[in-house]
Image (spheres, rainbow, N blue to C red):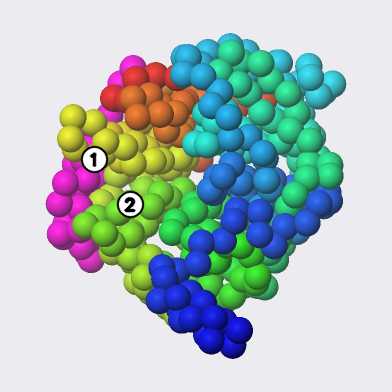
Amino acid sequence: MKKLLLIAALALAASPAYAAAPTEGMAKGTPALKSVSALAFGPGGVLFVGDPQAATIFAIDTADTKEAGKGDVLVEKLDEKIASMLGIEKANLSVTDVKVNPASGNIYLSVSRGRGNDAIPVLLKLDRTGAMSEFSTKDVMYSGVKLPNPTQGRQRQMAITGMAYVDGKLVVAGLSNEDFASTLRTIPFPFKEADKGTGIQIFHGNHGRLETNAPVRTFTPYNVNGTEYLLAAYTCTPLVQIPISDLKPGAKVKGKTIAELGNRNNPLDMFVYQKDGKDYLLMANSVRGVMKIPTEGITSAASITARVGGEKAGLGFETIKELHGVVHLDKLDSGRALILIQDPPPAAFGQPPVPASKITLTLKSIPLP
C-alpha cells in the first residue's frame, strides 16, 4: 500500500500543474456587495465583481455555460428598460461595466440603483434576444478576497478600476494607500489572499513627468510570443506596456509608455482582437472616439521618455469615425464587438457631465472594424 501511495505521489509531482475547478474554495451564500465597479470573467462562467467600497473582489459561479446563441444584439433605450425593471427614475441609474460571458455568450452588466454611498449594486443578465433579468446573488456559490491596502476617502471608487483573468490569476488595477498609489495586483484563483500589489510608475509624455499616483483607467492582457503583457491606458492618454511577470508583491515597476493618444481625454474600455491575421487594440475614449491601434511591433516600440511637443506620439492609430459615444465595449465573438453607446456622448474633458436624465443608452453588436 505504501508503495502504491509513493507511486501516486511521484506521478502527481511529475504531472502538469494542478488545475483547480472554478468553484474550488467557494461556499454557498450571499456575497455582501456594498458597491460594484469592474467586472471580469474567468473559467467556467465564473464572474469576478469588484466592490471598491468593501475593498473586496467576489468570484461568483454563474452556472451559465450553455451557449446562448449567435444572433446580433440590439437593445435600444437600455437605460429606460433597466430603470423600469428596478422601479427607479433613470436619473438614479448608472451603468458601471458591461462584459460578455465567454462560456455562454450572455451579457452581464453592473449597475448602481441610486447615487453616492447609498447606491445599491445590482447585476443584470441579458441573452442574445435582449431579454433582461436581474442576476440574483442570493444563495450562490461564491468566494471573496479583500484588498489589504485600498485607497481611502473620496478616491475609494478608484480602489478597483479594472480586472482581467490571465493564466490562473486575476489581475486587478486600482489605487492603494502605498507611496506608489497606482497599483497592479496578481491574485491567484481560487482565492486565498491578496498581497499589497506592485506599485506602478509611468512617464506621462503630455505632462512631461514621471507619475505614480495616476490610476489605470482601463487595461487588457496581450500575449506576444508566449509572454503576457498588460496594455494599460491612463487619463490624457498615455498607453503603457507592462510585463505581467514583473508584477511582484511590494515591487515598484516602471511601465513602458509606447504611445500618447491625446490629452484632455479619459480612456474608457479596451480589448485586443484579431482580424485578417493581424492583432489590433480597440479602445473607447471619452472625447476622442474609438481608436483601432495595430499591435505589430508593439514590444519593440520606442519608449516615450521626454515631453511630447504635440498631443500625440508613439504608436499610430485609426479613429473609427462612425462610432460615436461608445462608453463600454467587449469582444462578443471572433467577428463582432459589443458596444454600449451613450447619446449624447460624454461631455468634453473639464466640462460638467451630461445629466443622466438626458442620456439614452443603446447596446448593440457590430462587426469588428
Judge from the rendering whether residue 106 lies leftward or rightward of residue 276; answer left or right: right
Percent position (x, y) of residue 281?
30, 40
Can residue 119 be seen by looking at this rendering? no
Q: Distance of mark 2 from mark 1, alpha carbons?
A: 10 Å
Q: Residue furthest front?
A: 1
Does dot 2 land on a helix, a strand or a loop? strand
- Which stretch did the figure color magenta? 294-323
Looking at the rendered structure, the secondary structure element under dot 1 is: strand
Q: Are marks 2 and 1 in contact (CB under 8 Å)?
A: yes
The secondary structure that most of the magenta stretch takes on is loop
Confirm whether residue 291 shows in the render.
Answer: yes
Q: Residue at x 51, y 40 (%)?
A: 350
Residue 279 image label: 1
Give coordinates of residue 362: x percent, y percent.
55, 17
Task: Between residue 275 and residue 176, name the one nearer to us.
Answer: 275
Q: Residue at x 45, y 40 (%)?
A: 269
| Residue type at tag 2 | Tyr
Q: Quadrant of the C terminus?
A: top left
Q: Where is residue 109 drawn, in percent x and y?
A: 63, 33
Residue 230 at x, y percent in the picture: 37, 57
Q: Would you name the residue on which mark 2 appears?
A: 222
Marked residue nearer the N-terminal end (2 or 1): 2
